[in-house]
Image (cartoon, rainbow, N blue to C red):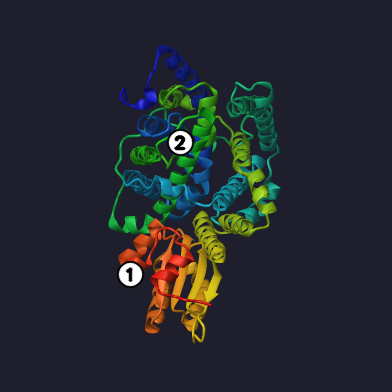
Amino acid sequence: MLKDNRFQGYSAGHLQKDIIAGLVVGVVAIPLAMAFAIACGVRPEYGIYTTIIAGIMVSILGGSKFQIAGPTGAFVPVLLGVVMQYGYENLIIAGFMAGIMITLLGIFKLGKFIKFIPRPVTIGFTAGIAIIIFSGQIANFLGLKGIAKHEEFHLNMIEILRKIATINIYSVIIAAICLAIVIITPKFLPKIPGALLGLLISTLVAITLFPGKVATIGSTYGAIPSKLPSFSFPDLTWDNIVMLFPAACVIAMLGGIESLLSAVVADNMAKTKHNSNKELVGQGIANIATSLFGGIPATGAIARTATNIKNGAASPLSGVIHGLVVLLVLVMLAPYASNIPLASMAPILMFVAWNMSERKEFAHILKTKSADSFVLVATFLLTVSIDLTTGVGVGLLLAIVMFVKRMSGSLKISKVLAETSENAHKSELMEYTMQGSLFFGSAEVLEDSFDNIAEAKPKVLLLRMSQVSFIDTSGEALLSKVVERLKDSHSQVVISGLQHQPKEMLKSTGLYDKIGEKNIFSSEPPVSKIKARHRIVTT
């Protein structure tokens, strides 16, 4: 730890700041840890275990100075789906596999590629997740009884409507008290975590005024153990690996995206620069370790990371202290947590969902009425109605198709000059300027233009390509086709302004030699030089 440059210039004053920030974030993390675990369909203590282990390990091993890791809202629909389909034990295996994947992404320095996911896709699935989290807490907010959970959003909504007659007025009162405190606290007591204050006051009201009237953690899940679970290695059979591989991929992808997004937010707030690949390695190892102790998958938590920075954190030590604070609370106060009403947890998660919904950014992209708007809405609707995997997959596919369509329209091939000699049966010199990228998406534009050129059979075709920065094999194949057709007509192709990537592509395929080095210029020579070299006399 001493060699870590994130601790450079560390002093006793910094230690004091880290202790204060760690205490605050630790207190904030406790209700969220339990709430997210319950929302994922597992016991509340598993969220506590995750916060302790992942929080400490990511701070020590990660690449961000202020990152706080733990269970997050983004994981809720994914993990709930895995639990409902495969059970908690298989969730642990999926988390273990995802940890290995995330670690490998960092080791092979693939962190930068995660950042290439288009913004409309990210906003779309984030808003979709927010809707799922919010709607998933309606039953606890209202105190509905006999609710059966489903993977499909519409079935969950139908289930709530069917059981609406079982509404518990005491639960509604407790939930309303907690929600009011969560909303009001930041305005009047900004230094006190609203979630914790709301949880404490609403719990005290429930115990004092409505004993036995509201479902609690204890009545639903039993007592919370006051110690960490023992080490247990997942049952990694080949059948389990194959079965859980898709789920592990989704967890790894989402964990990587969320952790790097959180690290970027931290950089913007604290004017620092994170190491994305090191961050992924830290996140991956933390998820592996968490699964060995019964925890659920974790990632960088944007809200807790922001709280860490706002409270004066000076180094990753604040994240370590935050994990130790949660551990001390688990050991000393776990029995009291059994009295927390589920109705008190619901508004906390609803408030988290509201804050993570990206509603302003969603509306901003929607107003553009562009292809991005279509990608955004498609990703959002598919995430909510089917699942996150489908939403992100289709969103990415649509984004790629839209990008290719836009890029294909950006290619311009313009005739600049066409000169003939007296009594000539064909053009002596044809000059074209090319702008854009020559790739598979622009194949139609290329073919139409090159067919017209080949039919004209000029003695010399001059292609000015200084504004062509990229050629793929499809573009090279079409260029090769026109060179071959013109050679059959005893014509020459001359290329000027050839940039580095196109030049390397032509060399690797042999087209460079086929055209001839004497006919390829890196600069833009005057037409008179071309005429002189090829003995063109025009009238």
Q: Quadrant of residue 134?
A: top right
Query: Which of the two labelled residues, at mark 1 and mark 2, occupies the earlier sequence position?
Result: 2
Residue at position x 38%, y 18% in the image? 9
| Residue 136 on image: x %, y % | 59, 47
Mark 2 element type:
strand
Residue matched to label 1? 516
Residue at position x 49%, y 56% in the image? 389
How many numbered badges does the structure rendering display?
A: 2
| Residue 1 on image: x %, y % | 32, 25
The answer to whether residue 134 is visible is yes
The answer to whether residue 28 is visible is no
The answer to whether residue 495 is left or right of residue 270 is: left
| Residue 172 on image: x %, y % | 69, 37
The answer to whether residue 512 is left or right of residue 399 is: left
**Which one is nearer the viewer's eye here, 54 or 61?**
61
Residue matched to label 2? 70
